[in-house]
Amino acid sequence: MQVDDGWSTSGLPADYVDSVPEFPAEFSSEFPSEFPADTPSRERVIPILPDSRVAPAAPKTTVTAEEARKMLSRNDSPDIPFDVAVNPYRGCEHGCVYCYARPTHSYLGLSPGLDFETRLVAKANAVQALRAELSRPGYKPSPINIGSATDAYQPIERDWRLTRGMLELMLETRHPVTIVTKNALVARDVDLLAALAEQKLVVVYMSITTLDAGMARTLEPRAAAPWRRLETVRTLTEAGVPVGVLVAPVIPFINDDSMEHILQESKAAGAHYASYTVLRLPWEVKTLFEDWLNAHFPDRALRVLHRIEDLRNGRRNDPNFGSRMRGTGIWADLLRQRFAVATRKLGLNRHRLALDCERFQPPLASNATPSLFAAAEAGASVASSSAASSSAASSSDFLSPVGAQASSGVPFSDGLPAVSGAVGRGARQLRAMAAGQLSLFD
């Protein structure tokens, strides 16, 4: 399934978003072609720093399948708001230059640079492995974060659908889950997310780094356009899914001046929560970011790096808990105060959503048949949420140019396998791997 990422197929420019209600009347005179005199204010759109750059051709992506021994990864970091995470993919096609997960590709003998963006690994048995872990005796549920390292809704999810399979499992077991993404593809699963939201089992955070489409093309070249992410926030909110926004990462003299604007537009789109982090430059990310900075902003490169050092106790990176996410010193305090003032004025973070861990039911074995009553109850939940969010879902049609091809290298020329469900997909992909169509060492 192809998904409109907002760069070329929506019918709107990539730098336009819906306006905030009560839009100033005098502004329309500056853009008479976009705003006819009789256009209601709620239908107007406002430009967000137009993008006049020509996007380079996306590099070819290849996907290798692997069989994961386990999916749950645990952490005890005091500055991370979750202690359990799953990541169905290694590497990320979005190509964000600042991604702190890039060094993990070195463990595979691949480069944290272009290989991280183009030589991806899909954990083909992700759903089955997660099911096995949730079935273990004595398992105690805690909200599972999807997308803590690499984006679970990156473009290859269109074909592999591993994230959707895990959400199906979360709904089956009534397990709480949190999602962090910067891709509009998350709205594809609005039916599952709405059903989970009805039971207080999910919250989605959309990462928005900038509203400048030109900057986004260079900073996050294959993530969804900024306006598309805001549209996704609106779609999920209208379906009853609690949504937050992450202004992350904040980069001095690059996007730090956009913080209030991002929060304002996110609130207008329906977001209830917000957070932010400051740029982190661990290991090879430091060199990659410096190269990007010198290529795209040579006039301010040294200024940016010196301010990063001011935030990091004189270093380019600070790995210490408590300070690595927000920085230290006077500039970190200024960011903290700006964020606090903006969220208070906009009414963000007024209450904290507590996900329900008491509803959990251990999953059935992959070859078991659910009881008639359990199946009926689960079906009723999905049906009711789908009916409640039908208008939101219908307004979120994912259109693509005629003849467009997915950028992934999944070797199914005729689309997804005929066998339905995540189990069937995973089994088919593993068989393809055994037959040599997919190689663990490609």
Image (tube, rainbow, N blue to C red):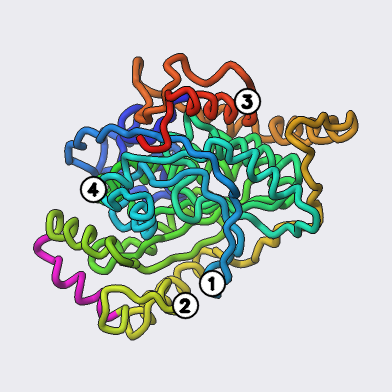
Query: What residue type is disc 3 on?
Result: Gly
Residue 428, image x, y percentages: 56, 24
Q: How far apart are marks 4 and 3 (CA)?
A: 38 Å
- From the image, tell me which residue sits under label 1: 77
Please tell me whether mark 3 sits on a helix, a strand or a loop: helix
Q: In the drawing, what numbered circle is on residue 321?
A: 2
Please state if 299 lies on the left or on the right of 257 as rendered. left
- From the image, tell me which residue sits under label 4: 218
Residue 394 position by quadrant:
top right
Marks 4/1 in contact by CB < 8 Å: the verdict is no
| Residue 188 higher or lower than 132, as above or below | above
Residue 100 position by quadrant:
bottom left
Of the residues under marks 2 and 3, which one precedes in the sequence? 2
Residue 391 position by quadrant:
top right
Q: Distance between the residues labelled 1 and 3?
A: 36 Å
Residue 236, image x, y percentages: 57, 42
Q: How far apart are marks 4 and 1 (CA)?
A: 31 Å
Query: What residue type is disc 4 on?
Result: Thr
Residue numbers of the magenta segment: 298-310
Q: How many marks?
A: 4
Q: Is there any visible trace of residue 39 in the rendered image?
A: no
Please tell me whether mark 2 sits on a helix, a strand or a loop: loop
Q: Distance between the residues labelled 1 and 2?
A: 7 Å
Q: Residues within 10 Å of mark 3 (few under 14, many from 20)?
A: some
Residue at position x 55%, y 19% in the image: 417
Q: In the drawing, what numbered circle is on residue 424?
A: 3
> Observer-nearest residue: 26 or 223?
223
Assess whether residue 224 is covered by the magenta stretch: no
Marks 1/3 in contact by CB < 8 Å: the verdict is no
